[in-house]
Image (cartoon, rainbow, N blue to C red):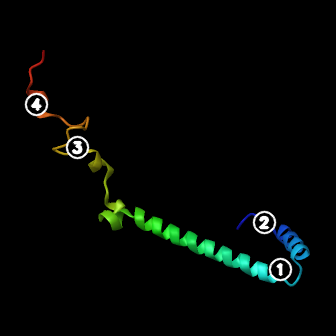
Amino acid sequence: MSGIGGSEFILLCLIGLLILGPERLPRVARQIGGWMGKARQMTRSLQRQLEEEVSIKKNFGIDPKDLNPNELLKPNDNDTFSPLHNDEDEDETPAK
């Protein structure tokens, strides 16, 4: 939860009772509970939205379990920037 133990919670309730009084304490506790509920709902909504945005399978149609890291390291035929790519023109040029 928030790291508050049972005795600390009771102490906070007693302080709230002394400051707010018995008639206002339930109303304030209900209001704080409503705020916390809204905060949790917003957090869940934000987490769900972020998970949807980052979902590789949904957005790109790729299942990460199907990816083979060795296949990803192989250069493509048109990949001229890869250090693994052997350019055919370099093989044909005479050495100086």
Mark 4 residue element: helix
Q: Which residue type does callout 1 highlight?
A: Leu
Residue 49 percent across, percent down from the top left: 46, 68
Q: CA distance from mark 3 to mark 1?
A: 68 Å
Instruction: Report the residue at 70% width, 68% height from top.
Output: 1
| Helix, strand or loop for disc 3 | loop
**Secondary structure under the numbered disc 1 in the rendered image:** helix
The residue lying at 67 percent from left, 75 percent from top is: 35
Disc assigned to residue 52: none
Q: Distance from label 3 to label 2 (Cα)?
A: 55 Å
Between marks 3 and 2 in the image, the one whose residue lies nearer the viewer: 2
Q: Which residue is mark 1?
A: 25
- Local packing at callout 2 (Cα closer than 10 Å; few below 14, some 14-19, many 20+) is few
Residue lying at the far right in this picture: please name it: 18
Q: Are marks 1 and 4 in contact (CB under 8 Å)?
A: no
- Mark 3 and 4 residues: CB-CB less than 8 Å, in contact? no
Residue 34 placement, left or right of 49: right
The residue identified by callout 2 is: 4
Amino acid type for the residue under numbered disc 3: Pro
Among numbered discs 1 and 4, the one appearing first in the sequence? 1
Give the mark, 2 or 4, whose residue is nearer the N terminus. Answer: 2
Q: CB atoms at circles 3 and 2 under 8 Å apart? A: no
Q: Which mark is residue 75?
A: 3
